[in-house]
Amino acid sequence: MLQLKIHNDKLECGTDEAGRGCLAGPVTAAAVILPDDFVNTLLNDSKQLSLLKRNNLKPLIEQEAIAFCVSHVMMEEIDKINILQASITGMHRSIASLKVKPDFIAVDGNKFRNFENIPHQCVVKGDAKYLHIAAASVLAKTYRDAFMENIHNEYPMYNWKQNKGYPTKEHREAIKKYGVTKYHRKSFKLLPEQLEIDF
């Protein structure tokens, strides 16, 4: 069973991202503050939930959260500042846009930069330990998936609707055959034989 948050006496937000390992599309980060009476036995790390469960949890989280925000950091910025910095930047933007300022930030993973001198704690696999981080992981994943499904219509040959931009064999084959799009991350190793791609 996941715990609500790290400090019971603080207004605490959980933050997480989705899409770090993708070859195309944004990295998407979310920040969520849940009420102290929030209870949900289904909520877990988004990677452990089915598509149906994630989609059912999304409106419930948005409805019950004290505050939430989701931010996309686009490909050009990822290429400029690197994926780790882009992930942290997305988390910062989401926290900055919350309608309530948290007293404490619980971060999924092991890397974060200080944000507005609000104390924070990094928690490895935090999305499987704390409800507010799990909630952020569900929002980040569902919003990013929706973005990828939307751009799939523009470039159906990459099948982003299915692979969401991750480096599947099919996705790499499509890059080999059709080249790269404006949605691909140029700083990533898109193919093993990188030199064959024309940007």
Image: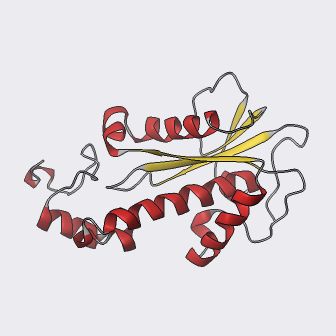
In this rendered view, identify the residue nearer to me: 31 or 45. 31
Residue 161 shown left or right of residue 93 in the figure: left
- Is residue 127 visible from the viewing direction of this image? yes
Q: In this figure, which colouring scheme has been used for the structure?
A: secondary structure
| Residue sitting farthest toward the top | 117
In percent of width and height, residue 10 lies at 86, 37
In this rendered view, identify the residue nearer to me: 116 or 99. 99
Q: Is residue 6 above or below residue 24?
A: above
Q: Is residue 167 above or below residue 74?
A: below
**Residue name at image x 57 percent, y 29 percent:** 113
Q: Quadrant of the N terminus?
A: bottom right
In percent of width and height, residue 101 lies at 74, 33
- Is residue 164 visible from the viewing direction of this image? no
In this rendered view, identify the residue nearer to me: 49 or 154. 154
In this rendered view, identify the residue nearer to me: 40 or 68. 68
**Residue name at image x 12 percent, y 67 percent:** 177
**Residue name at image x 79 percent, y 60 percent:** 2
In percent of width and height, residue 4 lies at 82, 53
In percent of width and height, residue 69 lies at 62, 46
**Residue name at image x 9 percent, y 50 percent:** 198
Residue 168 shown left or right of residue 89 in the figure: left
Q: Is residue 69 above or below residue 64?
A: above
**Quadrant position of residue 149:** bottom left
Residue 134 shown left or right of residue 181 in the figure: right
**Quadrant position of residue 173:** bottom left
